[in-house]
Amino acid sequence: MRKNIYVLMFTIAAVFNGWSQSHQKFTINNNWVFYKGDIDVSKIENSSTEKEAQWETINIPHTWNNIDATDDTPGYYRGIGWYKKSIFIAEEERPKTKTFIYFEGANQVADLYVNGKRVGQHKGGYTRFHFDISSFLKYGQDNILAVKVDNSHNIDIPPLSADFTFFGGIYRDVFLLKRSAIYFSMDDYSTSGVYISTPEVSKTIAKVEVKSLIKNELIGNKAVNLVNRIIDKYGQTVATTTKKVKFSKNEKNKTVLEAFTIKNPQLWSPDNPYLYNVITQIEDAKTGEVLDQSIEPLGLRWFNFDPEKGFFLNGEHLKLIGTNRHQDYLKKGNALSDEMHMRDIRLLKEMGGNFLRIAHYPQDPTVLEMCDKLGILASVEIPIVNAITESEAFTENCLVMAEEMVKQNNNHPSLIIWAYMNEVLLRLPFSQKTEKARYEIYAKNVTQLASKIEAHIRELDSSRYTMIPNHGAISRYKDAGLTAVPMILGWNLYQGWYGGVFKGFDENLDELHELFPNQALIVTEYGADVHPRLHSFESNRFDYTVEYGNKYHEHYLKSIVERPFIVGANIWNLNDFYSESRGYALPRTNLKGITTLNREKKDTWWLYKTYLSKEPVVKFGQNQWTIRGGVAESGTQHCTQPVTVYSNGNSVELLHNGKTYNVEVKNNIARFSIPFVNGTNALVAKSVIDSKTFVDVMDVDFRLAPNKFSDYKDEFYQLNVLLGSKRIYEDKKQSIIWIPEKAYQAGSWGFVGGEPYQPKTKYGSLPSSELDIIDSENDPIYQTQRVGIEQFKLDVPDGKYAITLHWAELESDKEHEKLVYNLGDDKVKEDISDRVYNILINTVYVEKQFNLRARYGSEKAVQIKYEIQVTSGKGIIIDFEKIKGLPVLNAFQVRRM
Ligand code: GCB
Ligand code: CA
């Protein structure tokens, strides 16, 4: 007995020791130095000769574009950056340790040098790669790792263009890996060397196959045992095999396939994401020492797509509803910690989503790890976006990327779709009209490339579906033959945003079903840009208001749910994300997220949660909107505005400053009209769900603007007005509210003359400018204006006032690269006309020959504050006296001093 225990302890110790030496993986993220620019490699190694000042100490994850891609200056650095770090390698590691460096991602071409010698290169910004650096190392000393990363535009590497920022750098974890001489090979596109598949799964039986690639660096015969063990959630072994594997002299690689049967398996699903693990070990046949070990997730499920009835998981129908996701975050660019990636997937789960399109590129490994754990079905794609290059090199890079994607992500049970080519016929290099013949060759080449990728993916993995997501120009894809290539068709549809009306979306869906009756259809994208600080009660396409985004999603959600042949849908997007060429309400940002860049939840997140989640929800809509404002209704001391409450109860009771309102819930929303008073408005919403009461509270600080100054009970203090606009803008930083303009009426305030500025663009005539306004954090104040304004008048009481006039010249003389999305692209230079005018305040000239563009340039925020005194009941009259062109005013502010 005693002896037995002794033997057991000895074995555990041996295994533990062997383990700790033979298989190690740890990050080397800290304390790198970075240099933006190119450097002579020969100077890299010898750190004493460089000017230290040029190298900045940084940690990985790192990008060099987090500032310049988000500032007011167009463009961002796309070029070379160098990273350098020294690592100590102990003398004892010389005899048998193999050392690898492993990158989870670097954008977009990375060259590794060790001790001044070039080790290798990896192309592509979104897939993982590694290098064996064993033979480059000096033992018992410091070794210099240097990585040259290049994010220049490269016609041979996708993506060529896209609506997101190509942040450069080593932006995901970097690891050092140590192995002993026999180990699971990473030679196959940096996989773990262990591949899991489930050729057959049912309620009663699951067949599991485990394929291992073993690499042998020893010379001479060697025998190892390959031990496979499947353990359940609680660590209990449910199946195990041991196989002897013999390497003959000089034999380097071996593939070993093992098959298992599990009876009455626990199935994996969104409601019960049950995970087994497969533990695979290489043991020394003589000593039993564990030479290498791999642990992979195993989820048992089966699924199929039916073009009529939808998606079925484990034989049960499941409507797939969720989001897309981009990998960036406020001020950090794409350089995020694991936890920040994980948080996003939790946000999706918390919302009740069961579907994630990992767009437009493979993301951090934690993303699919979380999908497995939380039960979110996923698709992932390679970043061929908007266009292709008709070259062998481009084709080759696409095929390699596809192979990296498939192999590196193979083991995730949550993953069900491989995708490629997003809206690849959007940016046409040849006009369909004037260069018809050439366009047709291009379209053929696109389809040929698709067919190659399709065949390659299917050969690598026949257990999942394939998909191509297209944009709304349906016939373009059909005529090119592209729609016939993948198993599933994805459609990115934006009717009611880029053009058209909401109903167009429904028509599109029905048309697609008719055109492609034999392919499953997914709405891979739909969304509207929303800036959570912008509101309107007369909201419109392209006004970026919360209210328009709500209308859009309320309509789309219903249309998607009503149609069983729409097997799934992904909101564009889970989060706002950086897109450098965008101006819009929050420059450099695509605002179609249902959360912001720092993951504040917008209304739409709550809308979906209320519909999808099984948890009780009672939540105020517009709950981020804490400073409201509006004009008092004539003869009253209040302003009535809508308040919405999301609830999955039947009715909601709302208390406002002691008064109670009761409303029935329709389509998960209770809609109220509340008379807001000046100052604090306390709101409480109550709803009974499953016989329990749930409550939400919201305090609104309402800034009641006077209608007739003589009616106004409180002392008049401040008024902030947006000209040419129906929007309300909340400036949280300065704690003020901007309200829409109104026409002047006697005793009140407002403009006289002119028209709202409505730029004519390829998306139609829009309610605000798309320019990024220089020198302002509050672009929406400057993006609207009244053109041809004659007067601004206020019948204020006597007193001392500060008046601020705000301008930005919106007719720009600069060339702009116009986006892109859904309608093609080109550079646009607007026709501009000069405008010159005089300004008078209470008949005194304050500006003569005022020429905004000549004085300040266009697209620039300009403010002039005038202090004036009002006497003898004359109020304030500002006159705009036109000399040439039409006078403009963007915003008006008055404060009683
Ligand atoms: C799309 C693209 C996506 C864009 C989106 C948009 O169709 O696939 O990359 O960001 O539209 O917001 O315009
Ligand atoms: Ca990571």
Image (tube, helix red, strand yellow):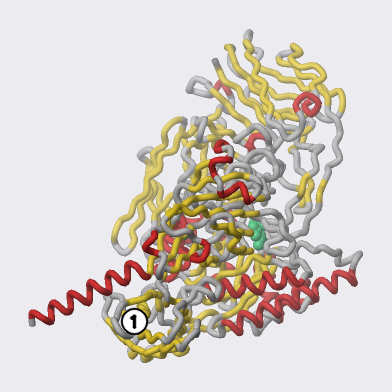
Name the amino acid, label 1: Asp
Label 1 residue SS = strand
Residue for point 65% across, 50% down: 80
Image location of residue 587, percent across then percent down: 64, 43
Q: Where 761 falls versus 649 (above or below)?
A: above
Q: Position of residue 351 (x, y in %)?
A: 44, 61
* Residue at x 44%, y 79% (from the top left corner): 218
Q: Quadrant of residue 447?
A: bottom right
Tell which of 369 and 357 is nearer to you.
369
How would you rate the neighbour count of disc 1 (Cα within 10 Å): few for under 14, some for 14-19, many for 20 or more? Answer: some
Q: Quadrant of the C terminus?
A: top right
Residue 552 locus on image (x, y percent): 60, 57
Quadrant hosting residue 508? bottom right
389 left or right of 165? right
Relative image position of residue 503 (x, y in whole percent)? 67, 64
Query: What residue appears at the point 50 percent right and 73 percent down from the top-left corner?
Result: 186
Q: In this view, does 766 lie to the left or right of 681?
A: right
Disc 1: which residue: 284
In front: 414, or 58?
58
